[in-house]
Amino acid sequence: MTTSRRDVRARLGSIVSGSQPGHATADLLCLACVDLLGVDGAAISMVHQGLSRGTYGASGAQSRRVDEYQFTFGEGPCLDAVRTSTAVLVADLDSPHELRWPGFTDATLRDGIHAVFALPIVLASVCVGALDLFRAAPGHLTDDDLAGGMLAAELAALPLVELAADSRSVARDDDYERLGDLDRIEVHQATGMLISQLDVDAAEASMRLRGHAVATGRTASEVAWDIIERRLVLERDPPPDTPGGEGT
């Protein structure tokens, strides 16, 4: 039975108004999207300066993992939705005409997701992330489901407000840092370990971590936990004057 727009608005609004700001409310909002909007998963992704900074809420482990691919590969619909401040609607990732995100698309299809819809989240007139809706079967959202998704994206900004140091100036860099760093702490910790172990800067350490994730078909967070718990040690590059190095 189709849920009316009025009922969708009432259900989503009650979640936000009746809960405390934070991850739990974001998760409940994502779960409601699955119940109400004809999708199989949902996630709220934080984005700052063109980079995925954290999965703020998710309806389940698979949705969190698919959102994580956007950080691992540095590409995906939520990043484009934030960059353009417009919805990115992909009815079939397996279409031969869909060539925008090769790494993200391959990994997402392997996880059994064929349709992705990214809806911008705006806070204090700034696009800070996206609500991602996932569906196993290809196909477009209905007009009612899209309208419900847009409402959910609008409401998704509300749990973030009180987490900023000053909600009236949430667009400041330090506020983004506080919001974005709520998740993927393990990636930051593992990156710090790699800086010391490999004698490289932060950018190189992050690239090594994500590169290993891509090469092994895993997410950056999964690789980070292996590094933190000493199950994985990445090797240093050989010096230029050794066999395999860049010397003459």
Image (spheres, rainbow, N blue to C red):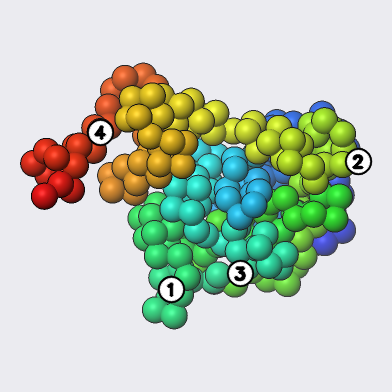
According to the picture, the residue beneath numbered tag 4 turns out to be 236
Name which quarter of the figure residue 147 lies in. bottom right
With 247 as the anchor, is 190 left or right in this view?
A: right
The local crowd at label 4, few if under 14, some if 14 to 19, many if 20 or more residues have their Cα within 10 Å, is few
Farthest bottom residue?
97
Return the residue at label 1. Answer: 99
Mark positioned earlier in the residue sequence (1 or 2):
1
Q: Which mark is residue 89?
A: 3
Residue 10 seen by the camera: yes
User: Which quadrant of the structure image shows residue 27?
Assistant: top right
How far apart in space, not on screen, are marks 3 and 2 (Cα)?
31 Å
Q: Residue lying at the far left in this picture: please name it.
A: 243
- Give the mark, 4 or 3, whose residue is nearer the N terminus: 3
| Rendered residue at 71%/32% (across/down) | 178
The reply, left or right, for residue 228 in relation to residue 90 is left
What residue do we see at 50% from left, 58% from top?
A: 75
User: Which three-letter amino acid code belongs to the residue tagged 4?
Assistant: Arg
> Residue type at mark 1?
Leu
CB contact under 8 Å: marks 4 and 3: no
Query: What is the distance, in whole Å, between disc 4 and disc 2 at their CAs?
Result: 45 Å
Q: Is residue 184 above or below residue 80?
A: above
**Residue kind at label 3, given as amino acid type:** Leu
**Counting residues from the N terminus, which is met first, the one under dot 1 or under dot 3?**
3
From this view, report whether residue 75 is shown above or below residue 87: above
